[in-house]
Amino acid sequence: MNRKLKYYELVWIKHDLPAGLTVFLVALPLCLGISLASGAPLYSGLMSGIIGGLFVSVLSGSQLGVSGPAAGLTTLVSASILSLGNFQTFLLAVIIAGLFQLLLGILKMGLIANYFPSAVIKGMLASIGIILISKQIPIAIGYDKPDFWTNGFLNLFSNNDVFGNFISLNKHISRATIIISLLSIAILISYSQSWTKKIRLIPAPLLVVILGIIATYIFQYYDALNSLKSTQLVKIPENIFGNIVFPNFSLFLSNSQIWKDGILIGLLASLETLLCVEAVDKLDKRNRITPVNRELIAQGIGNMLCGFLGAIPMTAVVVRGAANVEAGARTKLASFTHGLFLLLAVLFIPILLNKIPYASLSAILIITGFNLAKPRLFRSMWLLGWKQFFPFIITIIFILATDLLIGVLIGLLIALYFIIQNNFQADYKVIQSKQHETEVYYIKLHDNVTFLNKVKFRTVLDKIPEYSILTIDGNHCKFIDHDILEVISEYGVKAHYKHIELRLLGINLVPHATLH
């Protein structure tokens, strides 16, 4: 026992402690930025990261995964807070999301992600990226009036005085904010290039935050006229635990929207977690596989805690998981350590956190959004063909035009249409030939012929001309749906009246009822 403890102590000091510190430096600005994008109190993102590190890492079976607030949920969280009216009510939806995930895990539904077409999932993530970018642009330019896209941007072209409109817009933006945003974006883009690999000393998000704080001080002391306002800086209460908002349980059964939002958040969080787990497992040099049902249970308990403790919902996160692997993590102690560092930062350095400009966080989120909706993704989906690109682009259009649920459902319907169409084409083959002067048709049934083929199969049979020979071969078929057998049985009567010689191979006819 002592040797085992000593082994874990050595592993933690040599590998998991430095990896946990690295992930903390990546996670800190992301926790703040995702809270900002979600329209939630800033401390709620930090609380989500703390819960993900200290609790979910212990419950999870993943050795390298890291959980916390995710960019993929920002659109849904923001819309839910607005529709439910306040953050207290929204926290009830987070608890329901956790319960839903817990139930999925108990029912061993961890394979649910495999049933969502990848084109729809990619479309959903790309649309989230586009929304994320659009929501951060007003913050990145320091716009100080409500609703930039209506009152600011669109009004530029609302009348003939376009030049005057630009002058008016200029009065409501901050030059200092724009400079910090552009500098931050430039750093983040540079970090993604291979030539900077050898000079990367600290994680890009942390570097952006440090330079943002330095730039704020420079503007404050050397260019007071353009210095940042207090509303353009992070505001975290010094006593975070004294300012936590708790859910209003009296509304639990009073609003069906709470349940709808909760289940939707739970489903999306589960999908994102399962996709992340798969990605991080592929990075593990020791080829350890995360038990997906246990992961859903861990995430469910974590999100229930988030709801009870005033935090936004969490998922397993690819960015943090990949950073954990790159930093040399060996066990789940690295994720636990990152959660511990987040807790210590909130307890002991809230004043320093309040020096961070929103512009730095918005730049991080703009790049995060861009990574979700890269032009390269659109091009690769186009090259995969119409059957992949169409569900992908339809999902994006309808999410942007309506909401996440409607967009995903319409994308699923489009994808299902192509799946059904492929089934029609793949499950049987028709060969036509001539024997003397008689038309001969041979229909070979493939592995599985289901009710999805019923309409087209019946149409093919109806097109067989009179006085011909038809052979239907089911010898190589593993499964023939009862509906198909019924169609063949019914066709036997038609064939007799049309003088068609019907030959059946490996097919047992079934009795059929005639409806009057």
Image (tube, helix red, strand yellow):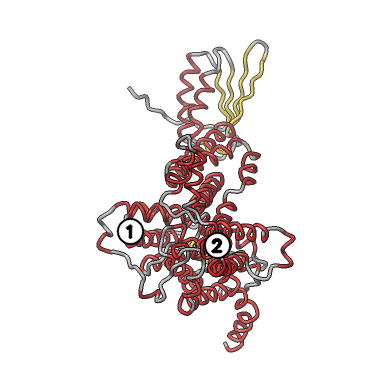
| 193 on left or right of 96 | right
Q: Nearer the viewer, residue 467 or 52?
A: 52
Q: Residue at x 47, y 39 (%)?
A: 413
Which residue is the site of mark 1?
A: 86
Mark in the foreground, 1 or 2: 2
Mark 2: give few (<14), some (14-19) or many (20+) Cα within 10 Å: many
Q: Position of residue 261 (x, y in %)?
A: 37, 53
The amino acid at mark 2 is Ser
| 373 on left or right of 244 | right
Q: Residue at x 51, y 43 (%)?
A: 396
Q: Relative to residue 406, is residue 67 depicted above or below?
A: below
Q: Nearer the viewer, residue 505 or 172?
A: 172
Secondary element under disc 1, as helix, strand or loop, is loop
The quadrant in which the N terminus is found is bottom right
In this rendering, does residue 232 appear at all?
yes
Which residue is the site of mark 2?
A: 360
Q: Residue at x 54, y 36 (%)?
A: 418
Q: Position of residue 514 (x, y in %)?
A: 37, 24
